[in-house]
Image (cartoon, rainbow, N blue to C red):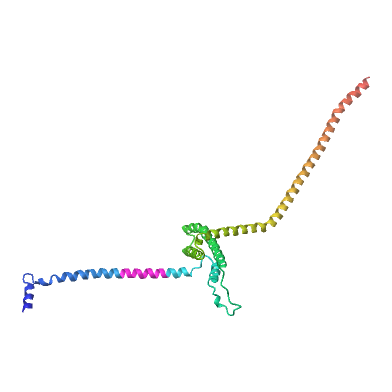
Amino acid sequence: MENATNFTDGFNSTNGTFEGFQSATPKLGFWSGLLLPTLYLTVLVGSLYTFSSLYRKRQASKAAQLEPWFPSHRTRDIYLSLLHMDPSEGGNDEKKLKKVPDNVLKAALLRRAVEDIQRILQLRTSKPALQNLQQRGSVGDDLMQRFQRAEKEMEAEIKDVVEEANAFAPNWGQVIFQSANEINQHILLKERTAEIEAQRETEKEWWENKKATIQSDFMKELDEEEEKKITQKKAGGSDDDAVLVEAGGPAQAQGGSKKKGR
């Protein structure tokens, strides 16, 4: 009876509605209104995340299939082989491997840093020209991706070399590339000197031929000048004789006439 009374009390006879249930209806509408945007945002974010992950995986697989900018790092492979060489791998005691000395490992690491310096210089010299070609549209995106991947690999390589150098000696990583740069400059100087030495014989032969040609041309010019002088002297002597003959003829004629008059 009490429930029936409450039910009848909540009924409004004027407009035919239940006043007791009016507060519950807006609450359901509010939560249902929030549910739809939440589902929309969830679906949108999920789709964007899926698309971005698939795109990154596709770009990574595409970049992995591209040809590397540099060939295999031979000095790095040699250093890693020496570093991870296990003396216990030898079979007999006579053929058992000894531990690689630290000075050999340091030399291998320094040689690795020298090759890194050479590759860094190649990247620095190639970057401006490559950027200009890309701006003109003469270079595709694949080539730029190869170049950018090479730059990232060199950054990781430099960090690895510095860490390895600091593991051998404290603060050696700060100066190892300076030493490698000096070694590289010395190598370039030796290569240039060898090129000059190789060209010395050909240059010497060329200069000897050039010298002989200049000397022969100079002697020809001297001979031609002497011949000209001789011909000029001969021509000048004949003209003087002709003038003397012409000048002496009338005088002799006058002298002869005077003798006849006497």
Q: Please name the residue shown 61% across and 57% down the image.
A: 189
Q: Which quadrant is home to the C terminus?
A: top right
State yes or no: residue 249 in magenta: no
Q: Please name the residue shown 68% across and 56% down the image.
A: 200
Looking at the picture, how far across and down is residue 104, in whole percent?
57, 67
Which image quadrant is residue 33 in? Answer: bottom left
Q: Is residue 146 at least partly visible in the picture?
A: no
> The magenta stretch spans which residues?
43-57
Looking at the picture, how far across and down is residue 142, in whole percent?
47, 65
Q: Is residue 106 left or right of residue 241?
A: left
Which image quadrant is residue 206 in? Answer: bottom right
Q: Please name the residue shown 30% across and 70% down the image.
A: 43
Residue extending farthest top? 262
Note whether 238 is above or below 85 in the view shown: above
Helix, strand or loop: magenta stretch: helix
Q: Is residue 97 left or right of residue 143?
A: right
